Amino acid sequence: MVANLVRILDGNTFVVSDERGDIEASKTDPTGLFSYDMRFLSTWVLTVNDLRLNALSTDDLQYFEARFFLVPATGTVYIDPKLSVIRERAVGLGFHEELTVLSHSDEAADLTIRIEAAADFADLFEVKDALTKIGTYDTRIDGASLVLGYQRETFRRETTISATAPATADEHGLTFKVTLEPHGTWTTDLNVVTSLGGLGRRVTETKYGRTNRKARPDMGKSLDEWINDAPHLECDWDPLKTTYRRSLVDLAALRFSPLVAGGRSLPAAGLPWFMTMFGRDSIFTSLQALPFAPELAETTLRVLGEWQGTRRDDFRDEDPGRILHEMRYGEMAAFEERPHTPYYGSVDATPLYVILLDEYERWTGDRGLVKDLEREARAAINWIDQYADLMGNGYISYKRRNEKTGLENQSWKDSWNSISYADGRLPSFPRATCELQGYAYDAKLRGARLARLVWKDDAYADRLEKEAADLKRRFNRDFWLADRGYYALALDADGKSQVDSLASNNGLLLWSGIVDANKAQSVVDHLMGPRMWSGWGVRTLAEGEGRYNPVGYHLGTVWPFDNSFIAWGLRRYGFKEEAARIAAGILEAAEVFGGRLPEAFGGYERSVTRYPVKYPTACSPQAWSTGAPLLLLRTMLGLEPLGDHLVVDPSLPASIGRLELLDIPGRWGRQDAFARGRVHVHADERAKAARKGRAHGD
Amino acid sequence: MADVTADFFDDLSKRGQEPLLGGTRTTVRFDIDDAGHTDRWLLVIRDGVLDVTHGTGDADCVIHASKADFDLVAGGRRNPMAAALRGTLTIEGDPRLMVRLQRLFPDPVGMPEVSGDRAVGKRRS
C-alpha cells in the first residue's frame, strides 16, 4: 500500500507512516522510522482499549512535523465517538510525539492506551531486496523505557522509547492506565531516540520537544530565512507562483547536512529514499538553483571535493580524481556488502563537478573557493583522460569493475535498457554515451577559464583549450549521424559503432556547447519535432525507436530535469522560442501536479491524454525535478552573468504574462529581472520550429 | 610476522610530504589497543607535511582501534569509512578529519572482509 503514506523528515532521518500515524512494516514495506539508512522502528501502533483508531484528518505541517486527528473505530458512522486522539509528531534524532486524548463524554472512562513498538533494524538495501539479518536483537526494559537494540560484532544501533506520563514498559511497547474525567484531557510525550554506536555524537534526546517546535535545520537557515533570502517572484500567471514557492520549500526539505559538511547543507537526491549525497543529483540541482540559492553549490563542491577518490578500488569503482556517486551509512555499507562508503560508479559527476565550480564562480565571483579547490578540480580534469578513456579512443566511457553490486549504466539514464540501438539491440560495455563527451568538452573549457583567472596557469589553460577543440572536432566526426541529422546516443564497445537511436541526450549536447554551429538547427528540429516533443516536453527516447515506450523509465518518458537543461542548451545556441516552449510545457505540467513536478511523466502525446501521466516512483519530491522550474525561470528570463553584471534577455511564453524576479543574488549584489510574455508557444509549433535563420551559440 | 600498523606509521614518517593533504593543518593521535596496553602514535600534519612520532601528545582528533582492526585498515584490507561505520574504528573530534585521513591509507588488496555468505564484489589486486 503506497497510497496515503505520511512522510516527514529531518536530514536523513525520516518517518513514513499510514494516515493514522501507525507503522506496521513488513520486511519489504517502505514504512518506518529511518535514520542513517537503517530502520529504527518497524512497528509503532496506537490502540485505545485494544481498538485501533481511524483517521479523521492528517496534516503535514512542515517537512519535519505531522499531525493526526483520530477517533476509535466504532464500526458505524451513526455512533458518535466518545473520545478523540491527537498525535503530533516531529522528526529529528528519532522523533517526538505528543499524544493527547480528549473525552467527549459526560462520564469518566478507564482507558488502556498502548503503543506497540518493534524494530527490525533493516538496512535500506534490505528493505528493497528482502534480505535476512546476520546480527542479533536484544530488548531491555530500563525503568519505564523500552530499549530495542541490534548488534553485529561491534556494529550497534539502538532505539530508546520513553514517555513523560507514568507508563509500564514491556518488551513490545508501553502501556498507560488512564482514568479520563468527563470532558477531560490526558496527554503524554513519547520520545523515540535513535543512536548509532561509535558514530557521531552520543544522542540522548530528540531534537524537538513540546515547547520546542520551531524548525531548526542543522544547516544554518530556517525555512523562513531560506524563503526570504531567495529572489521574490511576481507574475500574472498564478500557477507559476505556486510552483516557485513549492520548489523553494521542497528544496529546503531536501537540504541534507552530511556528517562531514560542518553544518552546511547540500541538496540530497530525493525524499525519502535518497536522502544522501549523490554526486550527479547534488551537482545538477546546485546548477539549477544557482541564481536562487548559490550556497548549495558551495557546499556541494566542498563536500564532494572532500570525498573525491584518491585510489584505485574496484569494489567501489573508485579512481583518483573521481567524484562519488552515492554515500550510505547502513549496515550493508559498513560490512562492505554494498560498496557505498562511498560508491564512485558515476561517470558524469566528475566533469560536471568542474562545470559547477566554474558556473558558481561566474555567478558569485567567489574566487576563494576556486583557489581552495584547485587540486580537486585538476584531479577531476585529469581523471577524464587518465581513467575514463576505457577504450583508448579519446572518449569517456564506462564499464563497472564491481560486477556484482556496482552500477551497469553510470550516466544519468541508469536503467538497464536505457541505451539502445534504433532496432532495440543493447550495446556492450564499455559504452561511451554522447553527453559525457559534451561534459568533458565543457569541463576543459571551463577549467581553462579558471586556470587563467584564478590559478594563474596559462600553459595549463592553453593545453585544456587545445584538447577541448580537438575533442569537439573528433566528436562531430565520430558521433554525428549525417544521414539522420543528429548525434548517436553512444559509441559501442568497439569504440566505433554508432548507437543510432534518437534520444534526449542530444539536448544535453547543446547545453555543453560541443555541437557544431552548423549542426544545431538539425538537432533542434529533431528535439522539437513530433517524435521527441510530446507537447509537455522532450521525450527521453524518440517515438518509433525499437525500445520506445511512453511509460518506460528512460525509454520515452519526459523528465523535467532533462528538459530544464535542454532549455538551457537551446538558449546557448540562440533558440529562444524553443526554450520558451519547453518552459511552458513543463511549467504547465507542474500546474497539474500542484506545483511539485514528479521525477518523470509519461511521454504520451499531449493532445491524446490532455494531462501529464505521472510515472510512479518512490521518491517525491525529487531534487532535480524540484530544481527544474528554477532553471526554467533562468532560461525564460535569459539570465546570464557577464563580468560583474547580470544580463537579462527574456523569451517568455505569452501565457505567463508579466514576470518579475526580484533580488537575484550574485556578484552584482542583488538585481531584478523583468519580462513580458511574447512567445506564443502553442501556435503552429512545427512551422516555428522549422523556421530558419537563427543566431547560433559559440 | 610483519607488524602492519608499525609499518604503516613507518611509511608515513618516510613519506614526508602528502600532496593529498595540502592545506590540512592538524594533529591526530592514534590510540591502538594491543594486548592490554595502548600504543600511541602522534601525526602532525602541516600543509601536507607529515611528522610522525611514536608516543603521546595533545591532538585535535583521536582515532581509536584495536591492533587487529587497525592492521586491517593500515594494510588495505578494510576501508576506513566502513570500519568507522562498523564501530571498529572510532573518532573523537571532527568527523571531517576522518574523511581527509582516509587519503593516507593504502589501496585495497584482496577481497573485502565479509561475514557470512554475502560477500560482494571482486577486486583486481
Image (tube, rainbow, N blue to C red):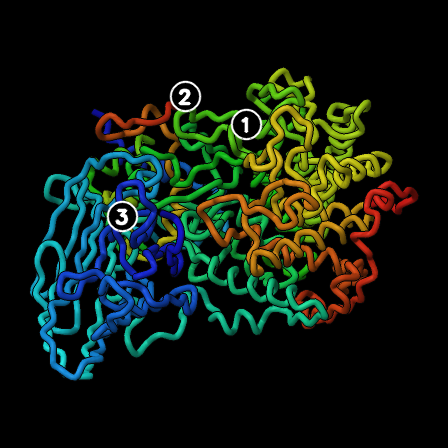
Amino acid type of disc 3?
Ala
Report the front residue among A51 and A61: A51
Q: Are marks 1 and 3 in contact (CB under 8 Å)?
A: no
Subunit under mark 3: A
| Residue at screen point 56% across, 37% down | A551
Residue A198 seen in the figure: no
Residue A301 vertical position relative to residue A244 in the rendered view, above or below: above
Q: Position of residue A91 (x, y in %)?
A: 33, 63
| Residue at screen point 72% across, 55% down | A584
Report the front residue among B30 and A318: A318
Tell me how far mark 2 sits from mark 3, CA to CA.
40 Å
Instruction: Give the class, few, some or many, for how many residues have Cα within 10 Å of label 3's Cα (few <14, many ≥20).
Output: many
Q: Secondary structure at mark 2?
A: loop
Q: Secondary structure at mark 1?
A: loop
Amino acid type of disc 1?
Asn
Q: Position of residue B124 (x, y in %)?
A: 41, 21
Residue A490 seen in the figure: yes
Question: Which label sits in the foreground, 1 or 3?
Answer: 3
Q: Is residue A88 left or right of residue A539?
A: left
Q: Residue furthest front?
A: A78
> Which residue is denoted by mark 1 in the rendering?
A417
Tell me how far mark 2 sits from mark 1, CA to CA.
28 Å
Q: Secondary structure at mark 3?
A: loop
Q: Position of residue B113 (x, y in %)?
A: 27, 29
| Marks 2 and 3 on same chain | no
Q: Residue furthest right?
A: A693
Report the front residue among A263 and B7: A263
> Which residue is denoted by mark 3 in the rendering?
A25
> Which residue is denoted by mark 2 in the rendering?
B124
Q: Are marks 2 and 3 in contact (CB under 8 Å)?
A: no
Tell me how far mark 1 sits from mark 3, CA to CA.
32 Å
